[in-house]
Amino acid sequence: MRDPVILPTSNTVMDRSTIKQHYLSDATDPFNRQPFKWDDIVDAVEVREQIAAFLALRKSKRKGAVAVDRKSTRLNSS
């Protein structure tokens, strides 16, 4: 999930692309079948920030693991 939004009638967090696909065929909340307007969808800023922090942490851990692997490879090849 890269672009989370909050649905107005169920307060459920979904990815914007997922709800957009649903909304094109049915303008109701898929969790409670209540009708809503596209303009009522709210950006889930806090969730987006949490996702970004999680991805940054994973990326930094991967870089650290790659650096350790490269260093150990150089030591073993000597």
Image (cartoon, grey):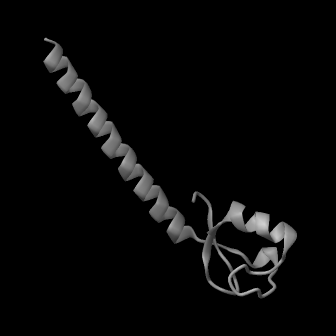
Q: In terms of depth relative to the viewer, which is nearer, 38 or 23?
A: 23
What residue appears at the point 51 percent right and 70 percent down from the top-left corner?
Answer: 46
| Residue that protrudes farthest toward the right in the picture | 25
Q: Quadrant of residue 39?
A: bottom right
Q: In terms of depth relative to the viewer, which is nearer, 40 or 19?
A: 19
- Residue 43 horizontal/vertical position (percent): 64, 70
Quadrant containing the N terminus in the rendered view: bottom right
What residue appears at the point 84 percent right and 75 percent down from the top-left corner?
Answer: 26
Where 77 sits versus 2, above or below? above
What residue appears at the point 68 percent right and 82 percent down from the top-left corner?
Answer: 31
Quadrant containing the C terminus in the rendered view: top left
Q: Quadrant of residue 22?
A: bottom right
- Residue 23 horizontal/vertical position (percent): 81, 70
Q: In terms of depth relative to the viewer, which is nearer, 29 or 50?
A: 29
Where 13 sits versus 33, above or below? above
Where 28 sits versus 48, above or below? below
| Residue that protrudes farthest toward the top in the picture | 78
- Residue 24 horizontal/vertical position (percent): 85, 67
State how many labels appear: 0
- Residue 63 horizontal/vertical position (percent): 33, 37
